[in-house]
Amino acid sequence: MVTKKIRGRGRPRGFDVDKGLAIARQLFHQRGFDGVGVAELSQKMGITAPSLYSAFGSKCELFERVLEKYVAEKSGWLVSTLQEENSVNATIAKLFKRASEVYTADATQLGCLVLDGARNCNDAKACELSAKFRQATWQMLCDHIAKEHTQKAPMLASYVLTILMGLSAAARDGLSESELQTIGEIAAHGFEVHVAQTT
């Protein structure tokens, strides 16, 4: 357990930062950055708003910590799929299949926080943070695709990321794993046909 002491009148003597991050992650995941206020975050964590600012600095800094922890804990499936010794076509098909599984695995946290956490957000800093993590995902995809399709890698990586974003949004809208997998299969086929026709 990671504990951070917070001093000040009306503040708890000890605060479990990891527990606070988990609570914030669930709220941000369910409703997005703009859909959750500091008052609710504080109430759910069992602390005051000043205590939250003392622990995390600001709502945006809390969001950044949540995204960092989420990526560290939840992106293993993406990294491992890209590291497998498969053709690019096979890798992309597997990515969409695994995304369908991951995005529907927890009914309380559907979709992907990195892709959807700043949806419909009016906070420029939060949008910038989310974009930074999406860009890192795009770069991993681009590097992998470039092994077989150097010139088209940036565009193809954008295509794959767009499909992943669509699968994430569809999961939040209630589509089942099997429905997402069907969509992923169609998208993977489109990827394969395109590279075959333009190579």
Image (cartoon, rainbow, N blue to C red):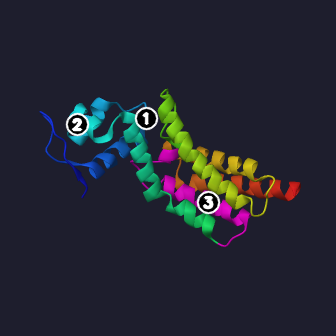
Q: Which residues are magenta?
A: 85-114
Crowd around label 1: few <14 · some 14–19 · many ≥20 (10 Å): many
**Which circle marks residue 33 in the picture?**
1
Crowd around label 2: few <14 · some 14–19 · many ≥20 (10 Å): many
Left or right: 95 as drawn, with respect to 171 = right
Left or right: 23 as drawn, with respect to 122 = left
The Cα–Cα distance between marks 2 and 3, rounded to whole angstroms, is: 40 Å
Residue 64 percent location from the top left of the image? 43, 43
Local SS, label 2: helix
Indicate the quadrant containing the C terminus: top left, top right, bottom left or bottom right.
bottom right
* Amino acid type, callout 3: Leu
Q: Is residue 1 above or below residue 123?
A: below
Residue 173 in view, yes or no: no
* Residue at the image point whose x is 56% and y is 62% from the top: 79
Residue 136 percent location from the top left of the image? 58, 50
Residue 69 in view, yes or no: yes
Dividing the picture into quarters, in which one does residue 92 lie? bottom right
Q: Which residue is mark 2?
A: 51
* Amino acid type, callout 2: Ser
Q: Is residue 19 above or below residue 35?
A: below
Q: Is residue 185 magenta?
A: no
Indicate the quadrant containing the N terminus: top left, top right, bottom left or bottom right.
bottom left
Q: Is residue 143 above or below residue 159?
A: below
